Image: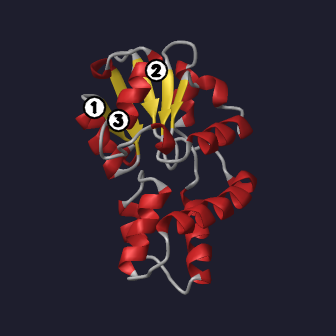
Amino acid sequence: MYDAYDGLIFDMDGTILDTEPTHRQAWRQVLAQHGMAFDEKALIGLNGSPTWRIAEFIVEQHQSDLDPHRLAAEKTSLFKSILFDVVKPLPLIEVVKAYKGRRPMAVGTGSEHAMAVALLQHLGLRDYFSAIVGADDVKRHKPEPDTFIRCAELIGVPPARCVVFEDADFGLQAARAAGMDAVDVRLL
């Protein structure tokens, strides 16, 4: 189905792993401790962004003087403590399995590199990917193309020969900006 491409790049959260409900749960719990809440639609619009950027948005919305990096660290810590018990692969993982050994594949995620590696190892999926690029591996994040361009470099495939699988508008914009075709997995 994707044989026309020389490299496959996958977003992680919400694309190959069902982590979105846990992200929302962690945000709800951490924000409640600070007497704040979030607009779920606004948060979904920020999918693919690094945690600190989402925290920055929430802090601005509440006109709080809370340090967004501290808030992001609290959320990430809670997220990690509950995620490993509940995370599971999404149906798109079948594409990953079908192309293992046939095409180089990478993960380009807004999550931290170490978190992505830990999750993929936990589920026995780490060896399917030649490269992982996390939010802490690039200076400019989705919707900028840097994450996916770095993935293409690491798997040794020109961007124009790659396809990106994404579930977020920022990620789809990043893929197009990188000169790659993109599959909106929300439409599959």
Neighbourhood count class around disc 3 (C-alpha, 10 Å): few under 14, some 14–19, many 20 upward: many
Say whether disc 2 or disc 3 marks the residue closer to the N-terminus: 3
Compared with 5, 111 (above or below) is: below
Q: Position of residue 97 (x, y in %)?
A: 59, 25
Image quadrant for the C terminus?
top left
Q: Position of residue 141 (x, y in %)?
A: 37, 45
| Residue situated in front as seen by the camera: 98 or 101 | 101
Residue 1 visible from this viewpoint:
no
Residue ID for mark 3: 146
Q: Which mark is residue 154?
A: 2
Secondary structure of the residue carrying numbered label 3: helix
Secondary structure of the residue carrying numbered label 2: helix
Q: CA gap, disc 2 to disc 3?
A: 12 Å
Going 47% across and 44% down the picture, which residue do you hit?
A: 135
**C-beta proximity under 8 Å, tags 1 and 3:** no
Q: Position of residue 51 (x, y in %)?
A: 49, 58
Q: Which mark is residue 178?
A: 1
Residue 188 visible from this viewpoint:
yes
Q: CA gap, disc 1 to disc 3?
A: 7 Å
| Residue situated in front as seen by the camera: 46 or 65 | 65
Q: CA gap, disc 2 to disc 1?
A: 14 Å
Going 71% across and 38% down the picture, which residue do you hit?
A: 123
Say whether disc 1 or disc 3 marks the residue closer to the N-terminus: 3
Compared with 35, 83 (above or below) is: above
Q: Is residue 90 left or right of residue 61?
A: right
Q: Amino acid at mark 3?
A: Asp
Residue 100 in which image quadrant:
top right
Image quadrant for the N terminus?
top left
Residue 89 in which image quadrant:
top right
Frontmost of labels 1 and 3 is 3
Going 60% across and 74% down the picture, which residue do you hit?
A: 30
